[in-house]
Amino acid sequence: MSQTTTIFSVVKQLSQYDTFEQIYHRHRHGEPFPSSDALHQIIDITRSVLFPGYFGNPSVDADTIHYHIGVNLEKLSEILCEQVLSGICFGECEKEGKLSEKQQKACEITSTFISSLPRMRKVLITDIETAYYGDPAAKSFAEIILCYPAIKAISNYRIAHELLTLGVPLIPRMISEMAHSETGIDIHPGATIGSYFTIDHGTGVVIGETTVIGDHVKLYQGVTLGAKSFELDESGNPVKNIPRHPIIEDNVIIYSNASILGRITIGEGAVIGGNIWVTTDVAKGEKVVQRRF
Amino acid sequence: MSQTTTIFSVVKQLSQYDTFEQIYHRHRHGEPFPSSDALHQIIDITRSVLFPGYFGNPSVDADTIHYHIGVNLEKLSEILCEQVLSGICFGECEKEGKLSEKQQKACEITSTFISSLPRMRKVLITDIETAYYGDPAAKSFAEIILCYPAIKAISNYRIAHELLTLGVPLIPRMISEMAHSETGIDIHPGATIGSYFTIDHGTGVVIGETTVIGDHVKLYQGVTLGAKSFELDESGNPVKNIPRHPIIEDNVIIYSNASILGRITIGEGAVIGGNIWVTTDVAKGEKVVQRRF
Amino acid sequence: MSQTTTIFSVVKQLSQYDTFEQIYHRHRHGEPFPSSDALHQIIDITRSVLFPGYFGNPSVDADTIHYHIGVNLEKLSEILCEQVLSGICFGECEKEGKLSEKQQKACEITSTFISSLPRMRKVLITDIETAYYGDPAAKSFAEIILCYPAIKAISNYRIAHELLTLGVPLIPRMISEMAHSETGIDIHPGATIGSYFTIDHGTGVVIGETTVIGDHVKLYQGVTLGAKSFELDESGNPVKNIPRHPIIEDNVIIYSNASILGRITIGEGAVIGGNIWVTTDVAKGEKVVQRRF
Amino acid sequence: MSQTTTIFSVVKQLSQYDTFEQIYHRHRHGEPFPSSDALHQIIDITRSVLFPGYFGNPSVDADTIHYHIGVNLEKLSEILCEQVLSGICFGECEKEGKLSEKQQKACEITSTFISSLPRMRKVLITDIETAYYGDPAAKSFAEIILCYPAIKAISNYRIAHELLTLGVPLIPRMISEMAHSETGIDIHPGATIGSYFTIDHGTGVVIGETTVIGDHVKLYQGVTLGAKSFELDESGNPVKNIPRHPIIEDNVIIYSNASILGRITIGEGAVIGGNIWVTTDVAKGEKVVQRRF
Amino acid sequence: MSQTTTIFSVVKQLSQYDTFEQIYHRHRHGEPFPSSDALHQIIDITRSVLFPGYFGNPSVDADTIHYHIGVNLEKLSEILCEQVLSGICFGECEKEGKLSEKQQKACEITSTFISSLPRMRKVLITDIETAYYGDPAAKSFAEIILCYPAIKAISNYRIAHELLTLGVPLIPRMISEMAHSETGIDIHPGATIGSYFTIDHGTGVVIGETTVIGDHVKLYQGVTLGAKSFELDESGNPVKNIPRHPIIEDNVIIYSNASILGRITIGEGAVIGGNIWVTTDVAKGEKVVQRRF
Amino acid sequence: MSQTTTIFSVVKQLSQYDTFEQIYHRHRHGEPFPSSDALHQIIDITRSVLFPGYFGNPSVDADTIHYHIGVNLEKLSEILCEQVLSGICFGECEKEGKLSEKQQKACEITSTFISSLPRMRKVLITDIETAYYGDPAAKSFAEIILCYPAIKAISNYRIAHELLTLGVPLIPRMISEMAHSETGIDIHPGATIGSYFTIDHGTGVVIGETTVIGDHVKLYQGVTLGAKSFELDESGNPVKNIPRHPIIEDNVIIYSNASILGRITIGEGAVIGGNIWVTTDVAKGEKVVQRRF
C-alpha cells in the first residue's frame, strides 16, 4: 500500500517537465532513434565484409564470397541508412526540414560510406601487418584479427572517422565509445590517423579530437595524446573545434603511460619513453626518456 | 571411455566438501540470488526514468510520460526488492531470521530508494552539464548522456551509493563493478561525491572506499584516489572501515594518471598535474606539477 | 537504383581475391571454427564447477552437487573439445593431417585439462584468500568471487595457461583477451604465475608473455610487466619466444602505474612504488619509490 | 566442389525472373512488411488490455492499471499502425499513391480500432460467460480465459473482423489464421457473429466468409458453416463477395461434425445433431438429428 | 495529437473497474502466476527423464545418465513446485491462508508427482509399443517418440491427470490444452485411461472429463467421446462432476470421426465404424458400422 | 530434506537400464541428432528461395536476388546435410559403417535435393494458383502464400516426399508432422501427389502413406484417405509397405469429412460428398453423396 503511494508520488515528481527540461530531447514521432544494437550489427557486418573468413560465415571461398558480400552490403546499407538518419535527426532536431529530405541525405551518405570500404580494407590490412610484425608474442594473423584489442579499436575508429567526415552527427562518437568500452582504447573519431598504425595492449590509450598521426606510428598502453588546456569564449565555455592535440609524425614510437599534451609536434622517427609528460615539441629522431630512479 | 573415466574421477574430487568449504556459501532454498541480469535491468530502468527520451521508449512526451514512469517504477520496485533481498540474505547468511522479516526490510529499502530518484536526477543533471561545458569535443547533451563513460560510471555510483547507505550488502559493489567493467572507471560505492562532478575519458580511474569529493571536481583518465597503506589488526588482517583515502575539496582538477594516496586533503581549487604521485596535503589553490624532462 | 549500382561495384571489388589474400585464412569445410560464444560458455561452466554455490545453480548442496558437476563436466568436455579442435585446425591450417587425428588430439587435451581442475581450484582459492585478506574494502568472499575483476582475470589466465601448456593454438589468447576486455587486465597466457596472487582494481595491468611471477605477489592498477626491446632476425622481424619480460620473486608488491621492463629480476620481498619505470634488477627486500615533487 | 557447382546452377535457375513472376510481389523499398511476430505482439497486447490480471503483468490493480494500459495502448498504436500500413501497401501495391497518405490512413484506422476496444471487451465478456456457464467441466473464469481455445479463436476473430471492417487488406486474414493454427478453429474475419457466442473443444470448426451468426449460439468441434457451391464468372473464376454461407439465428446449438452448407437459414432456437449434412433451411425451434444405426 | 487523445480516453474507459470486474482475478502480490513457458519446460524436462536419448542431451549413456536425471529432477522439482503453487493460489484465491502453508502443500504434491515418474514411464512405454505395432507406416520407435502426435498428447495427458488427481487446480488443464493446440487431440485431464492406449493421426479427437477407457484401446482421428446432455441445477447452471461421458472397455477400436456420446458402455472388444453417432450401449464384441451409400 | 530423498530414489529408479531399454536409442558420440530447430530453419530457407519477396528478406529484386538465393542455398546445404546425416545415423544405428561414408551419402542426397528445387517451385506454383482460383474468399496470391494452411502443408509434404524418395529415414516424417501440428493436415511423406493440388481449410485431413493422387484434385477439411485394414504377418505384426490407401484420379473433388478407405480407385472427375464413408471403387465422373435427413 505505502509502496503504491510512494510510486504515485515519485511518478508525479519525475513526470514534471521542469525537472528534466534542461536535458530533454524531444524525439519527433516516426523518426528513427540511435540504437546500440543496430550499431553493433553495423560493426559486425562491416568486419565480415572486410575480413572474409574471420567474421560472419567462416566457410566463404573465392567462388561464393560475392553472395555473402552482396547480402551483407544490402543489409548494411539498410541498417546504416536508418542509423545515419537517426543521427541527422538528433543533430538537427531544432531545425525544421522534411523527413524525406533527411532520408535522402542519409542514403547518399550511406552509399558513399559503402564505396569507401575497399579503401578501408586496404588501410586496415596495413594496421594488421604492423601489429603482427611488431609483436614477438603474435603467433598468426588470425590471433591479431580475432583477439587484438588494437584492431577492434582501430577498425571502429576508421569506420567512425569516415562517417564523421561525411557529416553524420552523434553516431560516430557512439561507435568509437563502443570500442572504448570493449578495449579501453579511446580514439576520438575526429582524429586523423595514417596507415601502418598499431597500439600494443592498449588499455588507457586516449587520442583526442584534433590529433594528427602519420604513418608507421606505434603506441603502447596508457598513452595520452591530449589537450593541455583550451580556450574559453566570453561566456566561459570552451571554444569548440580549435586544434589542441598533438601532431605525431611518421615512424614515431610512444611507450606506455606517456602523456603528450597540447598542439605540439613529435618529429619524424622520435621515440617517447614511458610514464613521461611531454608538453613541448620533440625534434625529428629525438629520444625522450624518464630519468631513472 | 577413458573420457568418461576422467569425468567420473574429477566429479568425485570436485564434489568433496573439504575442497571448497573455505569459500563455500550455503544458499538457503527459496531465497533469491544476486543476478547480474536483474542488476542490468535495474540500471536500465533507472536510467529510463531519470533521462526520459534517451533510454527506454524514445517517444515519451509530456502527456504520456507518466504512464511510462508508472510502469517502470512498478517494475523497478519488484526487481530491485528481490535483489535487495538477495543481498540481505547473502550478507546475513549466518544469522537466523525469518525470510518474511528480511522481505519487509527489502521492501522498505526499495521504497526509500525510489523516493530518492527525483533528488538523484537533480544531481546527475549537474554532472551532465559539467561534462558538457567542460569538454570542447562535446557536441550535445545527447552525446554526453548516450556515450560518455563518465556518466555511466557516475550514475551507477550514485545508485550504488544510495543502496549502500541504506544498508544493502553486496549489491552496491556489483553495480559499481558493472560500470567498472564497462568504462574502466572504478568508483567504490562507499565514496562520498558532491555535485557537478565529471571525469574525462576515464579509463583507469580508481576512487577508493573512504574518499570524500566536494562539488565541481574534475578528474582525468588514470587518476587514482587511493590508500597509502592500511592498519593490520593483531591477527595481521587489515582493519576495515578506517578512513584511508583522500579528501578532495571543491573546484579541484586532477590531471591524467596522477595518484593521490592516503587520508590527505587536496585543498579547494588546487590543480594536480598528470603522472604524479601525491602523498601529502596540498594547499588551497596550489598547483602541483611533474618536473618536465 | 544508384544504391544498387554502388553495392554491385563494391561487391565486385571486395570479392577480388587479391584484395584480401594477404590476411586470408582458408577454413576447411567441416572443421569447427573458434566461437566466442562457446568460449564464454566454457568459462561459465568452469567457474560453476570450481566455485559451487556462486555460479550456475545456486542451490547445489553436498548431496546433489555431483549431479551438477557431472552434467557440467560432460558439457564442458563436449564444447571444449570442439574449441580445442578449432584452435588446432587454425594453428595447423597449412599442414595436411586427418581430421580424425586432430579430433583425437583435441579429446586428449580436453581430458587432461579436465583432470587439472581440482588443482586449479586449489590455487584459485589461494588467490581469493589473498584478495580478501589484503583489501580492507572487501566485505566477504562472495564480494571477491562475484565482483572482483582480479578474480575474473586470474581465473581466465589460469584456464588459458593450462590450455597453452597443452599446446592449443589461438584459443588461450582468445580466453585471456575476453578477460582483458571485461576487466582491463591483460595477462598473456604464456606468463607463469604462482599461487596467492592478486591484483587490486586492475585496470591497465599488463603482464607479458615470458613473465615469471612467484607466490604471494600483489600488483595494483596500471602496472606493466613488459619488454624493453626485442631482437629482430635477419629479415627484420622480431624473434619469437625469447625471454624478454621480468621475473618477479615471492612476496613482491608493485604499486599503481609502475612499469617493470625487460628480463630483469625483482628480488624477493621487494616493494616497487607507483608511477615509476624500472629497467634494471631490484634486490631482495629493496624499496624503490618515485621521488616526490 | 560439385556441391558448389550444384549451388551455382540452382542459384541461376531460381533467380530467373520468369520462373517466379506469376506469384511475385514487388515490395517497395521503405514500406513495412507484414510480420507474424508483430501480429503476435498485437494479439498479446490486446489481450493484456482487455483481460487485466490474466495476460501481461499479473499484478495490476485498480490503482496502477492505467499506467499499464497507457503504455500498452501506446505500444499497440505504434505496432498496429505499421502492420496496417503493411497491409495497405500489399493490398494496393499496383496503385500509385504517396506513402505519407497511406501512413495517415493507417494511423486513422489504428485510432478507430483502439476506440473500439471497450466495446470489444464488453462482447468478449459475454462469450466468456457463455463458455463458463455452458460447460460442466469448466472450473473457473481463469480456466476459460487462460486455456479455452474457443476464447483464443473468438478474440482473434473479433480483432480481425474489426480491422477488416475498417478496410485493412491481408492482416485480418493473417490474424485469423494464427488462431486457426493454434486452435484448429477457422473463422473467416468476414463472418458476422453476435454476442454470447461459444464453441466447445473446437478443433475442425470452419466458419465461412459470409456467415451470419446471431446471439447465444453454441457450436461443437468439427462443425462446418460452409458454401455448397459458388458461381463462376465468364472466365470460369469464382465470383467473389457473394453471400454463400449460412445464417444462424439466435439460440441455435449445432453438435459436433455437422455441416451446414449454402446460404440457408437455421431458425431461432433450432438444434442440429452431430455428423449430419444440412443444405436446406431449418425452421425455428426444429431439431434435426442423424438417424441412428 | 488526436491519437494521444484517443489513447487517453480509451485508457480511462478500460481502467474503470466495473468494465472488467466480472472476470477480474485479483492476484496477490508475491504469489507466483501460471506461466506457459514454465509449463513447457516442465513437459520438456519430464520427457527428457522419461525417454532418455530422445529428448534433452542425446548422448546420455548408462554411465552418466544419473547425472542428467539428477539435475533434471532438481530443476523439475523447483519449476513444478512454483507452478503447482500458482495453481493453488489461483484455485483458492478467495480463501485466506498463509502462503507458507500453500507452499508446503505445493512441495508435497511435487514430491508425490516425481515419485510417480517411474510408473508413468512404464505405462507410456506400453503406449509407444502399441503405436508402433499397430501402424504399418511406423518405421521405428524413434519415429513414434519423436513425431507421433498421439504420444505427445498422451504423455501430456498422463502428466496432467497425475497432477489433477493430486488436487492441483488449473495447471492440469493448461497442460492438456498445450497438447490440444499442438496435436488437435483434446483429452481432458479428468479422464481415466488404461495402458496400451493409442490414437492414430489424432486431429479432432475429443475425450471428455468423465470418460473411462480400459487397456488396449485404439482411436482414430476425429473420434468424440463426449456428453449427450447435462443436468442443470435450479439456477439453470450445469451440475459439475456428474459422470456424463462413455466407458470404453478393453480392446475396443473406434474408427475416424465416430461420436460416442453419454454415459454409455462400449463393451470389451467392440468395434465402432467411422463417421457414426452412438448414444446407446454397445455389447461386448459387437461391430457397429455406418450403412454404406 | 525428504524432497532430496525422493529425488535420490527416483534418480536411481529412472537410471536403471532395464526400465528404458525397450525404447532406448544408443546415440553414437559425434553423430548429429535430429533437431526440430534445424528442420524449421530448413523449411524457412526453402520457402524463402522458392517464394522470393514473401519469406526472408522482402526487398529482393531482380538485381540482387541471386545474392540472397546464393547465401540461402549455401546455408540450406550445410544445415540439411547435417540433418540428413542425423536421419541416416538414426536409421542405420545398428549397422556398422564409417561416419565419413555416411557423411558423403548425406552430402550427395543434399545436392540432389537442392537440384530439385526449381522443379518443386514449378509444381508449388500450380498448387497456389489452384488455391487462388478455386476460392471466392481468396483476395490475392499473397493471402494464399502467407496464410493458407494448405500451402504450408503441401510445401512441407513436397519437401519431405523428395527427401523420402532419396532414402532419408525419419527426417521426412518429422517435417510432415511439423506441418500437421501447424495446420491439422496430416500428409504422409510417402504419398504420391500430382500438381494443381489444393485443400480447403484443411483441419483434420489425413492422407495415408500409399495414397496416389492425380492432378487437379481438391480436398476439403476433415477428409480421410486411409486404410481399411492391414495384413498381419505370422507374428501378428502389420506387414509394412503394402499399398493400402486409395488412388484418387485427376480432377476429383472430395467434400468435408468424407472418408475414403482402402486400396480403391476414385475415378477421374468423380465428386465425393461430405461426411460419407467410401470403401469401394467409384467410377469416372460419378457423384456420391450422403442421403439427406
Image: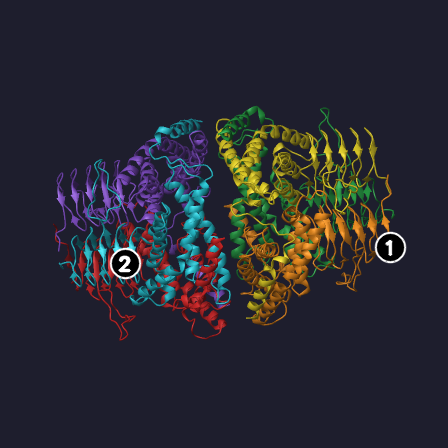
Chain colours: A purple, B red, C cyan, D green, E orange, F yellow
Type of the residue with mark 1 = Ala
Type of the residue with mark 2 = Val
Q: Chain of mark 1?
A: E
Residue at x-position 71% and y-position 58% = D132
Give the x, y percent position of residue A105.
39, 33
Q: Say which of marks 2 and 1 sits in front.
A: 1
Q: Chain of mark 2?
A: B
Q: Is residue F204 left or right of residue C112?
A: right
Give the x, y percent position of residue F210.
72, 36
Give the x, y percent position of residue F233.
76, 44
Q: Is residue F80 visible?
A: no
Q: Relative to residue E142, is residue E293 depicted above or below?
A: above
Label drawn at residue B206: 2
Label drawn at residue D265: none
Q: Is residue F6 visible?
A: yes
Q: Measure how far apart labels 2 and 1 are at the Cα level.
A: 88 Å
